[in-house]
Image (cartoon, rainbow, N blue to C red):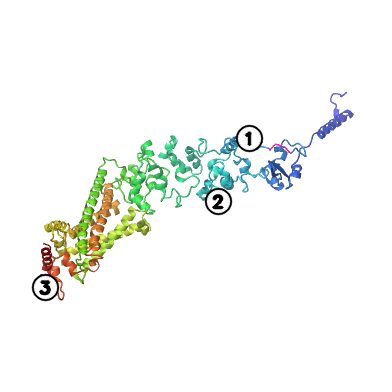
Amino acid sequence: MFSRGRNPGKGPGGYLIICLVMMLTGLAQARQPQQLTNADCLACHSDPSLTMDVNGKQVSLQVNEDKFKASMHGQMFNCVDCHKDIKSLPHDANVSKPTCAQCHADEQKTYDKSIHARAIAAGNSNAATCESCHGNIHELLPPSDPNSKVNHANIPKTCGACHGQKFVMETSGVTTTPVINYQQSVHGKLSAEGNDKAAVCTDCHGAHDIMGPGNPQSPIFKTNVPKTCGKCHGSEAAQYSESIHGQAVARGNLHAPVCTDCHGIHSIKRPQDPTATVNAQNLATEVCGQCHSGVTLTREFGVPGNRLSSYQDSYHGLAHEMGSTKVANCASCHGVHDILPSSDPRSTINKANLVKTCGQCHPGANESFTRGKIHLSDEPPQAAEAKILAFIRRFYLLMIWGTIGFMVLHNLIILRKKLVDRLHGHAHISGGPRIVTRMTKLQQIQHLSLFVSFIILVLTGFSLKYPNSWLAMVFINESVRSIVHRIAGSILIATSLFHIFYVIRYAEGRKMWRDMLPEPKDATDMVDVFAYYLGFSNRKPQFKRFNYAEKMEYWALVWGTFVMGATGFMMWFQVFVGDRVPRWWVDVATTIHWYEAILATLAIIVWHFYMIIFDPDSYPMNWAWFDGKMSLEHYREEHALDYETLSAVVMEDEPPAEQIVDAPQEKKNKDSAATE
């Protein structure tokens, strides 16, 4: 018995009880099998020759001891913590493969929703599993380790291991192009350089929950793209969300563009890169024009669909096509991420903000300057300026067809008759020494200056209108072309001003002016020319110093120079003009300048070049343009009534001036009598 208050452990019975308990506990522990250690497993699995036959293929069962110990799992678990069905050694060969879900249930649940898990469920054995991305389970490293396959810097290589292999991707019908594009993108290049802030695959697609772009839950679903990009580009995403495009997408309008529609998907590049879609040279055609040049937006939402073509027809568009890096593109006026409708007070193209917007390129622009249209074809039919422009176009088209048609007909009639005369053995009248002064030295200088400046203006002007032609390549780029065009225009204007001075100051200039004045005889001469060359008359008309054709050309030149000079200055100094008159006046000037250029160019080719080169009496060249001289025979034939010039010609063996003058008429009378 134990007395009250006595310590039972101090008696002989107490010691006996304690010893008995200890013995029973030791026996119980001896009967329980000890847990296997990693050393027990590695005793076999560290052998490189240890393999297993799996579907006829020998698979290595080796576990690298050093790598396993350095891995996350080697530091935290024993082998049997994952291989739970192994209790003793040697173990059964048919052991179950451990699953990551044993510890990572949440990640497994997320993965099961991914496109990879669904592909595996559909029988695609190439789809990614945990080990495909994280690596060998026995060598697993934390994402923070630079050697980990899921380290931020290594993600592109990890994903590319499958998505960059053509034979792997072809089985699921997926291209390998995205991997190549990413490597060349700004994100890919920055990541390759070691920039840990550069976007990699998982930043956009997610990690375990990767889904296709058609899944509304996917971060790359169209309406989710702005939020995905906004994780890195917060300020741009905020601007976009307030823009007309962002608001449309928020309403569920899938026609509106998101970040990837403009910047690309995997091939995103810096705006400064010439190959980037958002580069200034590519923006209009490859970005904005993809939506705003078709009819879809017009049909569905009433948005004008000819924005690209109307921009390309403007000076901005033409100069841009010529390679100008300064001229305005879509973003220059409308903005980039913060594009707003013109009705929004915050919009850069709102009427209240146009002065500031235009002033970025046109310093000094005021409200008057902004009262024009960039997209001219967007003008409503009832607008006054649109009617004026339409009238000018119709007027000049009629002028061009009518004037050039008349010139062609006129020259063809004369050409036919002269060719017939040559065929029947008539002498060529352009031969002989060139002793008649057709142009003085001062006149030659003016003519040469006019000729050179005009040709340069034609080449530089049409190269702008047709920026993809060989003409554009001659002038390298828009900056060079515009400078050359302005210099040539200045020379033409200076020559014209000197000509006015010449006509006033010099006697020969005043005489030339008087001789160029139209007179009633010019009208009768034109009728007589058609009658003679069409065979209705045997009497060839005779002309004074300048015939009606030369007078027409001279006065056309005076008119054309004034029109081209005035409209050219309006285009050149458009801010000065736009500040004083409505901006659309410059548009009118541009239209006139273009059609007048066509008219003048065709007139020179069809009218002037015919007289100087293609006329059989002048062929191969009337060299008067070069040295101011003509042969006596040729001049007498063309200007028999220019008594003063013919009388001034002094030649040996030539009859008196009276006979020289009368000779052509006498010859005609004899020819007429012989014919009768």
Q: Position of residue 480 (x, y in %)?
A: 36, 58
Residue underneath mark 1: 105
Identified by mark 3, the residue type is Pro
Residue 270 lies, with reference to residue 626, above or below; the image says: above
Q: Is residue 78 visible?
A: no
**Mark 2, mark 3: which one is toward the viewer?**
3
Q: Earlier in the sequence, mark 2 or mark 1?
A: 1
Residue underneath mark 3: 656
Residue underneath mark 2: 192
Is 213 positioned to the left or the right of 41 in the image? left
Kindly state the secondary structure of the residue where label 1 is placed.
Answer: helix
In this view, the residue in front, 396 or 561, is: 396
Q: Quadrant of the N terminus?
A: top right
CB under 8 Å between callouts 2 and 3?
Answer: no
Q: Earlier in the sequence, mark 1 or mark 3?
A: 1
Residue 541 lies, with reference to residue 192, above or below; the image says: below
637 falls in the magenta region: no
Task: Name the dominant secondary structure of the magenta segment.
Answer: loop
What's drawn in magenta, residue-wise? 93-97
Q: Position of residue 428 (x, y in %)?
A: 21, 67
Instruction: Classify residue 174 by image quadrant.
Output: top right
Distance from Cα at disc 2 to Cα at disc 1:
33 Å
Q: Position of residue 236 (x, y in %)?
A: 46, 43
Instruction: Classify residue 441 by image quadrant.
Output: bottom left
Q: Position of residue 75 (x, y in %)?
A: 69, 43
Q: Residue at x 25, y 63 (%)?
A: 613
As drawn, the label of residue 41 is none
